Image (spheres, helix red, strand yellow):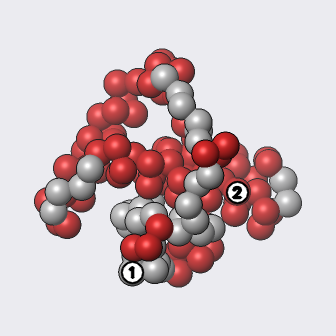
Amino acid sequence: MRWAFCASLREESSPPPFGKDAKEGSSDRQENTGDTGKKLRPDEVVSVNWHVFAGDYSEEIAAAFWIRHRQETSKSGEIDPAEYFKRHLQRGLNILEATMRNNGSHMALLGLVEK
């Protein structure tokens, strides 16, 4: 999940919204990285402690998130931090999934690190 979150933060665009607002925020990039418009079922929801999620990079990941959140709110108005985090995580998971599907191997994920 950490890789997914960081992959999304690396993108210049905002992560698309969930649910009914997803169509308004769709883009070519969203089509290439999966559908964030889907609603998660209760059995798909995972709760993870921040330290488990971020590990030794807790401060760096938090700082990167808050910088992006501040940049986004200055452009688009107030955004709920929890919702913004979930949008980044979902988009990142979609990026990882699309990368593996398009390249046929989990080894393709290493290419994300090299960019």
Q: Is residue 87 visible?
A: yes
Residue 2's place in the image compared with 39, above or below, is: above
Position of residue 68 measured from the top left corner of the image (x, y, whole percent): 29, 50
Identify the secondary structure beneath mark 2. helix
Q: CA distance from mark 2 to mark 1?
A: 23 Å
Q: Is residue 115 visible?
A: no
Give the quadrant of the N terminus. top right
Sequence-wise, the earlier of marks 2 and 1 is 1
The residue drawn where x is 46% and y is 80% is 23
Res. 58 image quadrant: top left
Query: What mark, if any, has residue 5 been given in the picture?
Result: none
Please rate how many residues cluster around mark 2, counting C-alpha atoms within 10 Å: few if below 14, some from 14 to 19, many from 20: some
- What amino acid type should be assigned to the residue bearing mark 1? Glu
In the image: residue 101, left or right of residue 50: right
The residue drawn where x is 62% and y is 52% is 41
Which residue was labeled with disc 1? 24
The residue nearer to you, when weighing 43 against 82, is 43
Give the quadrant of the C terminus. bottom right
Position of residue 49 measured from the top left corner of the image (x, y, whole percent): 49, 23
Identify the secondary structure beneath mark 1. loop
In the image: residue 17, left or right of residue 77: right
Give the foreground label among 2 and 1. 1
The residue drawn where x is 44% and y is 48% is 86
Residue 25's place in the image compared with 88, above or below, is: below
Residue 114's place in the image compared with 102, above or below, is: above
The residue nearer to you, when weighing 60 against 78, is 78
Q: Name, please, the residue furthest toward the right.
A: 104
Res. 77 image quadrant: bottom left
The residue nearer to you, when weighing 108 against 36, is 36
Please rate how many residues cluster around mark 1, counting C-alpha atoms within 10 Å: few if below 14, some from 14 to 19, many from 20: few
Residue 56's place in the image compared with 47, above or below, is: above
Position of residue 110 measured from the top left corner of the image (x, y, whole percent): 69, 46
